[in-house]
Image (tube, grey):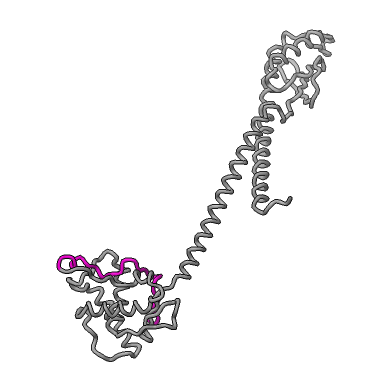
């Protein structure tokens, strides 16, 4: 049965990780073995140089045959002492009793009295039983790394899907369209249905939206003066209507008849969001409830609106 693309990807990740870790381990082990062999050879040569006076070696110059048995026994004793070093002394001056097989390397031991030929068998075996533990550890690391990669990919794809869903929801959610060219309110869901507004409520509402986005913490109360920043924004939109040729009338006083202005705005929004009443709360200036001290707590600002909720044409 063929593997799916995702499963095949994770298998490849696991295999590549395993191969890289195993290769790294054996490359490091190879160079460490070489260094250990070189160090061990140097130590053994030093030991032989110190024991040279006690060895009955052959000497062609003095026509001395020496004692092969003594040299052979010395090699046996020396190999027993360096058993854990990973190297074996195969022969000294051609005399040997070693039955160990392997790659041989001949060296020249230079002493003040003479030069000796010493042959070693070096440890070249990189595969040993103890490596099984390392290989199991490598498999565990490769498995863990593959799992982390899978989790990372899932998180990435989930984030991408969530972003796509958010963008789709944002694109599908209707928003308010204010057209300064026609002085109308409409929604992106039903642009054919538009509601006309007079200059004053139109300009005041656009100023209210912009003000609430810029100053979300400012409380707007009908018992207090309208902030200068809000009035300046309303005047800005009125002058824009003049530029568009809609009016040559005197600029309205946006501080007068505030409740009437807000009522006209609410009526227009009621018509626009007749089919989507749940969206009205975002755009709707809240009505005051109660009288006296309760009305003094009223805030007619737009708490939840943002730049993405409204589209102004002709701005």
| Image quarter of residue 64 | top right
How many numbered marks have been drawn onto this rendered protein structure? 0
| Image point (50%, 63%), residue name | 165
Q: Position of residue 248 (x, y in %)?
A: 28, 91
Q: Does the magenta run of residues contain 301? A: yes
Q: Position of residue 81 (x, y in %)?
A: 69, 14
| Image quarter of residue 139 | top right
Q: Position of residue 256 (x, y in %)?
A: 19, 80
Q: Is residue 69 above or below residue 32?
A: above
Q: Is residue 187 above or below residue 119?
A: below
Locate the C terminus by quadrant.
bottom left
Q: Position of residue 236 (x, y in %)?
A: 29, 80
Question: On the picture, is 54 further left or further right than 194?
Answer: right
| Image quarter of residue 218 | bottom left
Q: Is residue 267 above or below residue 127?
A: below
Q: Is residue 61 above or below residue 134?
A: above
| Image point (74%, 28%), residue name | 125
Question: On the picture, is 163 further left or further right than 277?
Answer: right
| Image point (72%, 30%), residue name | 127
The residues colored magenta run: 292-315
Q: Nearer the viewer, residue 119 or 298?
A: 298
Q: Does the magenta run of residues contain 136? A: no
């Amino acid at each position: 049965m063929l593997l799916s693309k995702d499963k095949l990807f994770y298998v490849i990740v696991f295999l590549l990780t395993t191969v890289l870790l195993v290769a790294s381990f054996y490359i490091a082990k190879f160079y460490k073995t070489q260094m250990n062999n070189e160090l061990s050879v140097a130590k053994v040569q030093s030991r032989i140089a110190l024991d040279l006076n006690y060895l009955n070696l052959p000497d062609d110059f003095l026509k001395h045959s020496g004692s092969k048995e003594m040299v052979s026994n010395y090699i046996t004793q020396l190999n027993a002492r360096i058993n854990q070093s990973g190297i074996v002394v195969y022969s000294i001056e051609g005399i040997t009793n070693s039955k160990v097989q392997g790659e041989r390397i001949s060296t020249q031991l230079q002493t003040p009295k003479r030069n000796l030929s010493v042959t070693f068998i070096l440890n070249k075996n990189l595969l040993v039983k103890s490596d099984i533990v390392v290989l199991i550890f490598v498999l565990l690391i490769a498995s863990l790394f593959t799992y982390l990669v899978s989790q990372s990919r899932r998180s990435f794809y989930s984030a991408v899907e969530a972003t796509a869903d958010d963008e789709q929801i944002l694109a599908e959610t209707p928003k308010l369209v204010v057209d300064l060219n026609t002085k109308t309110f409409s929604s992106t869901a039903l642009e054919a249905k538009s509601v006309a507004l007079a200059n004053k409520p139109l300009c005041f509402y656009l100023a209210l939206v912009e003000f609430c986005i810029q100053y979300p913490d400012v409380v707007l109360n009908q018992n207090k003066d309208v902030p200068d920043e809000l009035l300046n924004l309303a005047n800005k939109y009125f002058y824009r209507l003049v530029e568009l040729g809609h009016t040559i009338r005197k600029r309205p006083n946006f501080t007068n008849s505030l409740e009437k202005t807000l009522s006209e705005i609410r009526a227009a929004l009621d018509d626009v969001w007749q089919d989507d009443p749940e969206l009205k709360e975002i755009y709707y200036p809240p009505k005051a409830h109660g009288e006296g001290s309760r009305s003094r707590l009223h805030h007619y600002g737009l708490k939840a609106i943002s730049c993405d909720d409204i589209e102004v044409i002709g701005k």
